[in-house]
Image (cartoon, grey):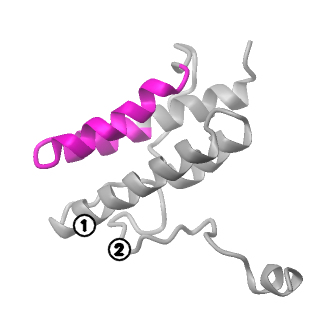
């Protein structure tokens, strides 16, 4: 039996991937199918999982990596496809609300990081 935390990650990630794939479907069916293929490789979300507002895929994907639901290669593929999806949706003037500070996804960067902080960078030297 999985923990409620893992169940929430699964549910959120499935919902977010499906939402992006649905937005891509009319004009980019191959990318939509590739996004949905990621969801098929994840365990199905439990029927009892909490339904929450859509969330951005990158932070969810990193959480899925942390708990062992994705491996590094799967994470990379999902993040690259999500970035491509964001760019395509932004180019046609149709972002998707992912709960981030910028609902239009005006940048590909994540508000949760993406690179070492100044403090972290100096600690790596």
Q: Tag 1, which secondary structure? A: helix
Q: Residue at x 76, y 86 (%)?
A: 118
Does residue 17 show up magenta in the picture?
A: yes
**Could you tell me which secondary element the residue under label 2 belongs to?**
loop
Q: Residue at x 43, y 24 (%)?
A: 40
On the image, which quarter does residue 108 sit in? bottom left
Query: Where does label 2 land, which residue?
Result: 106
- Mark 2, Cα crowd under 10 Å, few <14 / some 14-19 / many 20+, is few
Residue 117 visible in the displayed image: yes
Chain part drawn in magenta: 16-43
**Residue 56 seen in this snapshot:** no
Residue 64 part of the magenta-drawn span: no
* Residue 91: percent from left, percent from top: 19, 69
Q: Is residue 118 above or below residue 91?
A: below
Q: Residue drawn 53% across and 21% down?
A: 45
Is the residue under label 2 in contact with that under label 1 (CB below 8 Å)? Answer: yes
Residue at numbered disc 1: 90
Q: CA distance from mark 1 to mark 2?
A: 7 Å
Find residue 124 and report its image quarter.
bottom right
Instruction: Locate the N terminus and report the quarter of the image it occupies.
Output: top right
Residue situated furthest left in the rendering: 26
In the picture, residue 88 is in which quadrant?
A: bottom left
Query: Horizontal placement of 53 versus 87: left or right?
Result: right
Q: In x, y percent, where is residue 23?
A: 23, 46
Q: Is residue 105 left or right of residue 115?
A: left
Q: Is residue 16 above or below residue 85?
A: above
């Amino acid at each position: 039996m999985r923990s409620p935390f893992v169940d929430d990650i699964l549910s959120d990630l499935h919902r977010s991937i499906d939402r992006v794939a649905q937005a891509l479907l009319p004009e980019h069916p191959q990318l939509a199918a590739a996004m949905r293929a990621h969801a098929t490789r994840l365990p199905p979300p439990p029927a009892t999982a909490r339904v929450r507002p859509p969330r951005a895929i990158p932070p969810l994907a990193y959480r899925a990596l942390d708990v062992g639901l994705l491996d590094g290669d799967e994470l990379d593929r999902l993040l690259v496809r999500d970035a491509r999806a964001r760019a395509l949706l932004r180019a046609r003037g149709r972002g998707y609300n992912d709960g981030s500070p910028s609902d239009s996804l005006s940048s590909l960067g994540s508000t949760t990081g993406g690179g070492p902080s100044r403090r972290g960078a100096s600690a790596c030297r």
